[in-house]
RNA sequence: GCCCUGGUGGUGGAAUUGGUAGACACGCAGGACUUAAAAUCCUGUUCGCAGCAAUGCGAGUGCGGGUUCAAUUCCCGCCUGGGGCACCA
């Protein structure tokens, strides 16, 4: 990619040229623009950030979640994580590690395709342009990425291997016996010997066949059965279908049941879809969480997503018809519940509007209402169905029969029950479940109380500790214990069984879109046939139009040659490439394998992975599953991709508003708004608002003079804006471009300021206000070395004990803070150090040199320059990290805060070696303490060595 | 609605294991240097009350309660900002 490095003509390992600050010349100020240009050129030329796959040093792999190259370019939120990872990479490198720190682009995706539909520009072209912009912006900041390893998921050289891995998943099933992915051939061999007795079919658990039956099946039947086992399989699923646009829409393209573009109605439509059988990995994904360092919140989110629960599946007999003459329906109603102990409290059943029994059990008198209700639900998204506080539902006219007492329970349909979870049917226990309770109240269904005084008639109580009543043979039993008793009875009666359930569903793995990886699959007589490996990559073809194909198919269905070859017309989703890209960085140019096994054995897991929590359950679960599958199949030697995950917070935009008096051209300053007037708030560009004060001229010139004639009502001659925190986005005019800040203050200032803003993990709105402070710090650092008038002021003198104390305290603090990713406090420690050295007028090389090495990860350009100015040859990147020595920082005494009844009254300097008795006598001998004691005797004196003293009276 | 997470001066934040709340910055105020400005340096800056002042007293980490010698930190209830909820990435 970059033709530099040992092979290039421009390669000069240690020749560092072009310093405009030669000693003896007048220019001795911190000229960050020239310094940064000079060192970025040097790093590029010398291949300073090239990483080798073989080294004697221990390895360390630091990875950022790669960006989607959007058309809007980089804003100040993007680099936050990259700066953190850059600091950590450089820190590890200085500490003697061989550090892999690559970057690439998640380049397939919906926005590029949407842009293509609207502007007719090929997504590959716009993506390329966007990547070039991103790259330029990233280069500005001085990152240590090894760009020779850059990858793009939309590059055929990359997606060849995405397709290849897909084929491995297609050719595998999850063996519940060995608890891992195995090849389909093994499954077929087992079928031929024993039928599927040893292998429950995950796609259809009721499927049973013998070896003889298997052998008698035709090829199509066999393939259909195997499809129900494959880790990548084809099935049918619902999508958001918009008839008017003739296309499938993403969830966030649907707002309130209509399309975001055009506001056309959107309904659910069943389409053939590819899926990944991630549910088979549910337990391992759960177990694996214990072996990796994810934050507690992240672990919890993933656990909740997987949603493992223990309960029972119960079959209820259904009766239909009018009262007194009800007859059994053919099939039972299968219900999943985690609380079988509440079975005598069931007052109604609720089934999902998609439930397959609806047609069969709806009574004639209810048919019209049911049809209407289902039509209504079709227009609603899963999210809306669960979020809505409004309670909706419809009675089917049929009843389920309680197997223990024969009670007939009405069966309702309601949208809050989702078809995809459990059996799509629940038993409603209003006294124990809040949602059931609201449902019963709303529809006036009588409530049975089985928990006595634990239920107050107003609110459900989900306790497991109540003693059951109104519960037949369970009366007097604690609920917790009743669970097993009921399951035992159900099993004995043959109408129920213990069941582990997962909330997680299989991952939908196809999109009816153009800009994604084509599936290497042909359809022959309804059977999916994989392409041979030799035909990979299957290239994405050129299309005339990016709009959808017939019947909800993707754009590829519009290409006659594609369809003639019977190729799959779906493409893979955005997360396909990101599920394994971290492996490709290790061996990015390998044309024979996705990643050489020896290489992946060397680099192994990503040691530190940095990215936002918004990927908590999508990307991070999929990539964990792919890693486990590749591990099971023997392609890699580890089954968790990320050893440690650090979630950077989101940088939000801070939007500025002006207020236009309704129907006028008068803009009123925020402080002059009147309650009884109506105003239209309008977002203005944050870049011409200083704090909240707006630059009136800039506003008038904005958007080609749209507001040139604006009138203002000012406060003290100034216009103040309103402020709101929201997502940073171009359309909200609240984006801040890092390029501008780098231009104005330099990359080193920008990097340190992003870190100084607060803990990386915390979300916060961007505010450029404080950046000057960090810039001043770097200038102050510079002045320890050079004086504007005198030039060089640093010298070779020996450091004093006081200076060594400052230095070693800083070493300890920086190492500790960097190690625990507390970059903001590390920046402040640098400031303290420079402030103290300035106060002491310490310009001594032995001290300053050590400080520069520590500063290198944070401010690499200025560190390189000053390192060179100190007369060092070569790069500070190759220096060795300072070693903390306790002896320089030892204190003999401490100024203890002395509290009386928890209130600090005075400070007393006491030796750190003092014992409790000594401390007590010193403290009680103190005049101020005596005054506060008011001649009372202390009850107790608490002395925590090195911390504080508290006298309890 | 469900899951996760945050709330500390005028502002960003610090306080690592329950032990001096407000480190370090921004901003602001006053001062030095300068013809002036920029840059730089110095002093002050949680709030309230008292005092000419040094200082003293009281309150204080979203709100209300609890545990403890001691709570920003632990527990219970509430208010509120942000993220996710399966086709945005």
Image (cartoon, grey):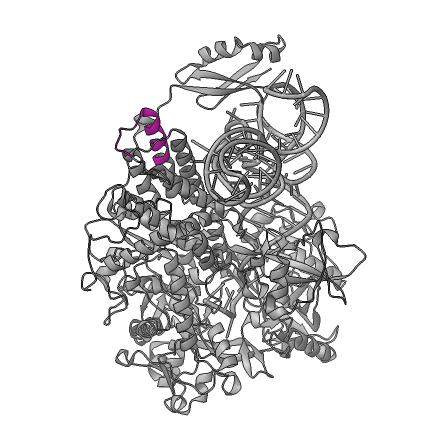
Q: Position of residue A908 (x, y in %)?
A: 49, 16
User: Residue at the right extreme?
Assistant: A676
The reply to whether residue A445 is in sight is no
User: What residue is at 26 percent from the left and 28 percent from the top?
Assistant: A798
Magenta span contains residue A807? yes
Q: Position of residue A180 (x, y in %)?
A: 34, 63
User: What residue is at 29 percent from the left and 65 percent from the top?
Assistant: A633
Vertical placement of residue A490 versus A230, above or below: above
Q: Which segment did they paint magenta?
A: A795-811
Q: Position of residue A429 (x, y in %)?
A: 66, 58
Q: Quadrant of residue B58?
A: top right
Is A474 left or right of A95, judged from the image as shown? right
Residue A364 or residue A657, whichever sits in front: A657
Residue A426 or residue A541, whichever sits in front: A541
Residue A579 or residue A653, whichever sits in front: A653
Is A845 left or right of A392, judged from the image as shown? left
Is A227 left or right of A381, judged from the image as shown? left
Give the quadrant of the C terminus of chain A: top right
Vertical placement of residue A937 versus A380, above or below: above
Give the quadrant of the N terminus of chain A: bottom left
Magenta span contains residue A13? no
Count numbered badges in the picture.
0
The reply to whether residue A716 is in sight is yes
Instruction: Give the dominant element type of the magenta stretch: helix, strand or loop.
Output: helix
Q: Position of residue A736 (x, y in %)?
A: 51, 58
């Amino acid at each position: 990619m970059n033709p530099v490095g040992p092979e290039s003509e421009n390669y000069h390992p240690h020749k560092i040229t072009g310093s405009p600050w030669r000693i003896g010349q007048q220019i001795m100020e911190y000229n960050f623009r020239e310094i940064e240009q000079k060192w970025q050129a040097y790093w590029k030329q010398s291949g300073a950030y090239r990483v080798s796959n073989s080294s004697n040093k221990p390895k360390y792999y630091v990875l950022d979640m790669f960006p989607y190259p959007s058309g809007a370019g980089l804003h100040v939120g993007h680099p936050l994580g990259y700066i953190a990872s850059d600091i950590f990479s450089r820190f590890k490198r200085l500490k003697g590690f061989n550090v892999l720190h690559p970057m690439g682009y998640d380049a397939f995706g919906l926005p590029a395709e949407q842009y293509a539909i609207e502007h007719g520009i090929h997504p590959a072209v716009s993506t390329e342009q966007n990547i070039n912009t991103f790259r330029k912006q990233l280069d500005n900041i001085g990152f240590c990425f090894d760009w020779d390893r850059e990858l793009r998921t939309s590059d055929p050289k990359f997606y060849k291997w995405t397709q290849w891995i897909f084929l491995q998943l297609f050719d595998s099933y999850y063996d519940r016996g060995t608890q891992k992915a195995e090849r389909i051939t093994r499954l077929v061999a087992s079928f031929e010997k024993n039928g599927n007795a040893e292998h429950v079919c995950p796609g259809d658990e009721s499927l049973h066949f013998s070896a003889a039956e298997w052998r008698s099946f035709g090829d199509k039947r066999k393939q259909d059965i195997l499809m129900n086992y494959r880790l990548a399989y084809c099935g049918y699923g619902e999508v958001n279908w918009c008839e008017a646009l003739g296309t499938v829409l993403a969830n966030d393209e649907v707002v309130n049941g209509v399309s975001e573009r055009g506001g056309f109605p959107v309904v659910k439509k069943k389409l053939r879809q590819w899926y990944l059988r991630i549910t088979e990995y549910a337990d391992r994904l759960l177990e694996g969480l214990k072996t990796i360092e994810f934050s507690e919140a992240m672990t919890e989110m993933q656990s909740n997503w997987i949603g493992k629960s223990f309960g029972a599946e119960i079959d209820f007999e259904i009766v239909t018809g009018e009262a007194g003459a009800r007859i059994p329906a053919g099939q039972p109603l299968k219900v999943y519940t985690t609380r079988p102990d509440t079975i005598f409290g069931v007052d109604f059943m609720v089934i999902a509007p998609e439930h397959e029994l609806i047609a069969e059990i709806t009574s004639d008198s209810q048919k019209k209402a049911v049809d209407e209700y289902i039509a209504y639900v079709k227009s609603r998204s899963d999210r809306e169905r669960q979020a809505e506080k409004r309670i909706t539902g419809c009675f089917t006219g049929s009843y389920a029969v309680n197997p223990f007492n024969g009670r007939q329970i009405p069966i309702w349909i309601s949208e809050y029950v989702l078809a995809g979870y459990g059996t799509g049917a629940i038993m409603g226990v209003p006294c124990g479940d809040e949602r059931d309770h609201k449902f019963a109240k709303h529809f006036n269904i009588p409530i049975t109380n089985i928990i006595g005084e634990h239920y107050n008639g107003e609110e459900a109580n989900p306790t497991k500790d109540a003693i059951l009543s109104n519960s037949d043979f369970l009366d007097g039993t604690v609920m917790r214990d009743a669970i097993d008793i009921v399951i035992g009875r159900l099993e004995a009666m043959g109408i129920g069984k213990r069941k582990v359930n997962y909330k997680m569903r299989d991952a939908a793995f196809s999109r009816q879109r153009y800009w994604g990886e084509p599936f290497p699959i042909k359809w022959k007589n309804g059977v999916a046939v994989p392409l041979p490996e030799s035909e990979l990559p299957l290239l994405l073809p050129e299309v005339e139009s990016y709009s959808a194909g017939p019947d909800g198919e993707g754009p590829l269905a519009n290409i006659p040659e594609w369809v003639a070859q019977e190729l799959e017309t779906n493409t893979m989703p955005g997360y396909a490439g990101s599920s394994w890209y971290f492996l490709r960085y290790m061996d990015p140019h390998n044309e024979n394998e996705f990643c050489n096994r020896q290489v992946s054995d060397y680099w192994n897991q990503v040691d530190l992975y940095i990215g936002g929590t918004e990927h908590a359950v999508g990307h991070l679960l999929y990539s964990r599953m792919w890693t486990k599958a590749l591990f099971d199949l023997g392609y890699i030697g580890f089954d968790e991709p990320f050893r440690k995950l650090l979630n950077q917070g989101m940088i939000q935009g801070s939007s500025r508003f002006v207020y236009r008096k309704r129907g006028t051209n008068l803009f009123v300053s925020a402080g002059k708004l009147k309650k009884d007037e109506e105003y239209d708030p309008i977002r203005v560009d944050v870049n011409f608002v200083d704090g909240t004060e707006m630059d009136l001229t800039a506003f008038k010139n904005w958007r080609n003079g749209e507001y040139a004639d604006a009138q203002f009502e000012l406060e003290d001659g100034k216009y103040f804006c309103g402020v709101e925190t929201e997502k940073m986005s171009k359309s909200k005019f609240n984006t801040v471009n890092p390029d501008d800040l780098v231009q104005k203050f330099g990359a080193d200032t920008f990097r340190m300021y992003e870190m100084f803003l607060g803990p990386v993990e915390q979300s916060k709105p961007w505010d450029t206000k404080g950046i000057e402070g960090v810039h001043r710090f770097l200038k102050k650092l510079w002045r320890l070395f050079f004086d504007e008038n005198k030039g060089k002021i640093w010298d070779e003198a020996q450091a004093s004990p006081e200076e060594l104390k400052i230095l070693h305290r800083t070493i300890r603090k920086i190492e500790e803070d960097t190690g625990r990713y507390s970059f903001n406090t590390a920046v402040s420690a640098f400031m303290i150090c420079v402030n103290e050295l300035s106060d002491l007028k310490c310009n001594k090389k032995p001290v300053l040199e050590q400080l520069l090495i520590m500063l290198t990860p944070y401010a690499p350009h200025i560190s390189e320059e000053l390192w060179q100015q100190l007369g060092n040859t070569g790069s500070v990147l190759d220096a060795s990290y300072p070693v903390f020595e306790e002896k320089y920082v030892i204190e003999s005494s401490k100024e203890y805060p002395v509290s009386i009844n928890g209130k600090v009254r005075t400070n007393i300097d006491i030796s750190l070696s003092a014992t409790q008795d000594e401390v007590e006598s010193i403290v009680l001998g103190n005049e101020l303490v005596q005054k506060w004691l008011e001649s009372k005797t202390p009850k107790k004196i608490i002395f925590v060595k090195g911390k504080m003293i508290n006298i309890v009276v």
